[in-house]
Structure formats: C-alpha cells, structure tokens
C-alpha cells in the first residue's frame, strides 16, 4: 500500500484509484453512519476523493493514509448533513431491504444487517461502534478522528452496546 501512496503522491491517478478501491467499502460504511440519502453518501465520498487527491502530497506519514482519508470523509459528511439537515430523513425510518435494492453495488457487504443493528443508536454511538469494531481503531484514534475526549468515546461505545443488547433481548431485530 505504501508503494501506491508514494506513486499517488507523485500524481499517478491509477495508483490513487487503486488506493481508494481498496477501502471503498469502509468509506461507504462510515458515510452511511452519518447520511441516509444515497446521493449524499456518494457526494461525501466523491468530495473526499477530490480533496484527498489534491492534498495527498501533504501526507507525511504513509501509514496514516486511511485515518487521514476517514477524517476528511467524516468532515465532509458532517458538512453535507448540516447543509441538508431539513432534507435528511431519520436513520430510524430507513428500510434496509429497500436501501439494499436501490444500491446493488454494495450487496456483497453485510451493511444492511449492520445498519439494522445500529438503527436505534445516535450518530455518535453509531460512529464509535463502526470505527471501533469494523475499522478496529483504538479509543485514542477514534477520539482524534471525532475530535472528542477518549472517555466520551468509551461512553458512546458503552451506551451503544447497551442499546444493542437491550434491543436483542427484547427481540427487536
């Protein structure tokens, strides 16, 4: 991966495309935690790619590439969410089966079951659980990405797990 990053930093578009292709599913999952509209998700990812391609030369630590890209994505998602706040539907109102039919490019993922599990959580809880369990980031890394305290991340994880556990016990899945 580091070789691709070095090539991308020299302006190699194919290398950059390969880098993005390797983590496209992770980017989608993260954007999906914040945005419910497929068009907004695609816009956030596309805007992230534009910024990343322009600024990849500034990346100093090659091993931090994915974290750097996710931080850009989170900021883009937050911007789009705030811009379209009145237009976005609640995460709780999303029908996973219809969302899966609308976007068949991601049918190989298990994201619809994943989103059903996360549907009763707040944005912060969804993001913390996604980054911690799916992306395997540490508490410290998540706190930096989300610009919050580590203890806040721990609290969000605990609350999210408890809500998921309670829904499971009640048969809510």
Image: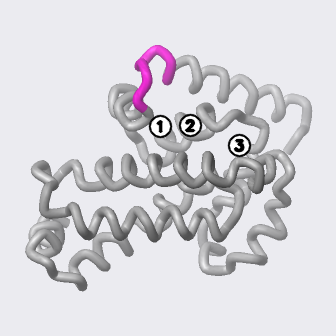
* Residue farthest toward the top in the current orientation of the protein: 151
Q: Quadrant of residue 170?
A: top right
Of pointers 3 and 2, the one earlier in the residue sequence: 3
Residue annotated with mark 3 = 118
Q: Is residue 79 above or below residue 2?
A: above
Farthest residue toward the bottom? 14
CA gap between label 3 and label 2 equals 9 Å
The residue at 10%/68% (across/down) is: 6
Q: Secondary structure at mark 1?
A: helix
- What residue does disc 2 label? 129
Question: What range of the chain is rendered magenta?
Answer: 147-153
Q: Is residue 150 magenta?
A: yes
- Left or right: where 90 falls relative to 5: right
The residue carrying pointer 2 sits among few (fewer than 14), some (14 to 19) or many (20 or more) residues within 10 Å by Cα, namely many
Residue placed most toward the observer, 49 or 101: 49
The reply to whether residue 33 is visible in this rendering is no
Image position, residue 131 (x, y; %) = 47, 42
Which residue in the structure is indicated by mark 1?
A: 132
Tag 3 near tag 2, CB within 8 Å? yes
Disc 1 versus disc 3: distance between alpha carbons? 13 Å
The image quadrant that residue 130 belongs to is top right
Say which residue appears at 41% left-offset and 42% top-offset. 136
Is 52 or 94 nearer to us in this picture? Answer: 52
Answer whether labels 1 and 2 touch (C-beta < 8 Å).
Answer: yes
């Amino acid at each position: 991966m580091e070789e691709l990053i070095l090539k991308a930093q020299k302006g190699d578009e194919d290398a950059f495309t390969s880098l993005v292709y390797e983590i496209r599913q992770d980017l989608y999952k993260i954007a999906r935690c914040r945005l419910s509209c497929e068009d907004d998700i695609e816009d956030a990812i596309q805007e992230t790619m534009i910024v990343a391609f322009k600024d990849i030369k500034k990346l100093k630590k090659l091993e931090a590439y994915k974290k750097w890209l996710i931080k850009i994505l989170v900021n883009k998602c937050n911007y789009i969410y705030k811009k379209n706040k009145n237009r976005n539907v609640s995460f709780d109102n999303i029908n996973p089966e219809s969302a899966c039919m609308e976007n068949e490019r991601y049918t190989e993922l298990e994201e619809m079951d994943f989103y059903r599990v996360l549907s009763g959580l707040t944005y912060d809880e969804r993001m913390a659980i996604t980054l911690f369990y799916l992306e395997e980031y540490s508490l410290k890394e998540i706190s930096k990405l989300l610009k919050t305290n580590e203890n806040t991340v721990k609290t969000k994880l605990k609350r999210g797990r408890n809500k998921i556990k309670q829904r499971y016990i009640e048969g809510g899945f």
